[in-house]
Amino acid sequence: MGLENKIYIIDVTNRDGVQTAHISLSKFEKTMINYYLSEMGIYQSEFGFPALGHEWNYIEGNLRLSEKGAFGDLVLSGWTRATVEDVQKAVKNTRVKHLNLSISTSQIMTEGKFGGRLNREDVLKIMAEAVAAAKEAGIETIGVNAEDASRTEPYTHDRRYDEDYLIRFAQTAKEHGADRIRYCDTLGYDRTISIYDSVKRIAEAVKIPIELHCHNDLGYAVANSVEGAMGALDAGVDAYINTTINGMGERAGNADLVSVILALKKSRGMQDKHVLDPRIDLTKAWKVCNYAALAFGVPIPINQVGVGSNAFAHESGIHADGVLKNRQNYELYSPEELGIHEAEIKPLGRIITTGEYGGLKGLRHVYNSMGLEIENEREILRLVQYASLHNQKPLTKDELWFIASYPEEVERILTIDPKLS
């Protein structure tokens, strides 16, 4: 493992997490997710779909916010299919500068999704043309996703997986301008041993940084993400782990953001390796996880790693005695490390709120109670009303602050035009 190589976090809540069945986020909530991720020091947010019309105002608004410094150093990247058409639509309608292009590599998907119209050579050609188009269009960072990478090859005669096609895929992508390859364990099929071996072999052969995108169908998402990343580091390249807040995502979800960070910092043998991006501030974990739970409308499970209400609860007599003597007897990390303080108590008695049906006096009272004075009150009231309508839930203090701080960008983000396509 090269000492200079690191593991960076690319959070995909705003792309993959929002594809969780039956639930979603508003464009403004996605914007707030980007804000919280930036506060936490996350390297990159895969923030949307620049080839989709209903995302264009949101994407442009967030890019303008980024230019104003609202998201710090957070990189905003888009996702498209690995086709020239999608790339051209993305660059024509947005100013996105970082893209991940995705296409299936496994035989079962190549045959099943493309109906026999394409073979593996066709996949390589289509992907290469898309990468070349993105490069020509001035995209600064190009990631290429090998969807279903973990099922790409059948067993060979020696009962090992053969990554020859994935190596060709990665080499072709690199030759046409790709900066990274995303190894997708799309169905959560891999094991820690197999993903380590596969990623290491690809990275050694192609010398290209590897992203790990793991799903949790078999409960391996976090472990596979960590061990796959270690395979990349041991091959001498950087690794990027895809996460979602609270593990949201299709079916059983994706690798959980906080769990991945804790595993890289606290698990056996990792404490002294310092492989994780040093900019990450774990004390922001409590805030981002609770905001995502509120926005998605999905409570954090009591046994959720790090931020669940039982994460630091001890009932067994032996455990209680041990932790009272020394918390390290039964805790690998402390609540303070995750930014967990005493829970906010909802105020009782007279409460003034502002929202979809609020007025100027209520708005003024709420902002004054936050220690904020606003000059353009009627404009902010209009945005607060529409943001509350947009979210379909009461606004948080951070959301109200964000609206007052960036009214022009928020207005664009709240504007959805069904005529766009």
Image (cartoon, rainbow, N blue to C red):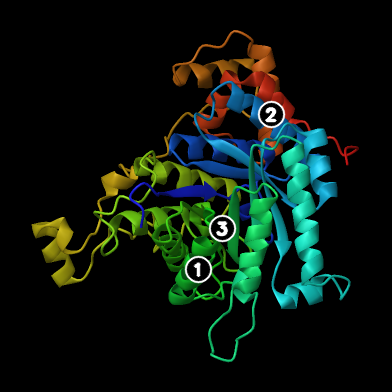
Identify the residue shown where x is 58% and y is 78%: 162
**Which residue is under mark 2?**
61
Q: Quadrant of the N terminus?
A: bottom left
Identify the residue shown where x is 74% and y is 73%: 109
Give the mark nearest the N terminus, 1 or 2. Answer: 2
Q: Is residue 87 left or right of residue 78?
A: right
Q: Quadrant of the C terminus?
A: top right
Hey, what amino acid is under mark 1?
Answer: Arg
Crowdedness near tag 3: few (<14), some (14–19) or many (≥20) residues, C-alpha within 10 Å: many
Q: Name the front one of labels 2 and 3.
A: 2
Task: In this rendered view, identify the residue nearer to me: 395 or 144.
Answer: 144
Q: Name the front one of labels 1 and 3.
A: 1
Q: Secondary structure at mark 2?
A: helix
Q: Is residue 251 left or right of residue 332?
A: right
The correct choice, above or below, for 286 with respect to 123 in the image is above
**Which residue is under mark 1?**
201
Q: CA distance from mark 1 to mark 2?
A: 40 Å
**Which residue is under mark 3?**
248
Counting from the top left corner in percent of width and height, residue 62 is at 65, 31
Determine the image quadrant of residue 327.
Answer: bottom left
Hey, what amino acid is under mark 2?
Answer: Gly
The correct choice, above or below, for 415 with respect to 234 in the image is above
Identify the residue shown where x is 79% and y is 60%: 125
Q: CA distance from mark 2 to mark 3?
A: 24 Å
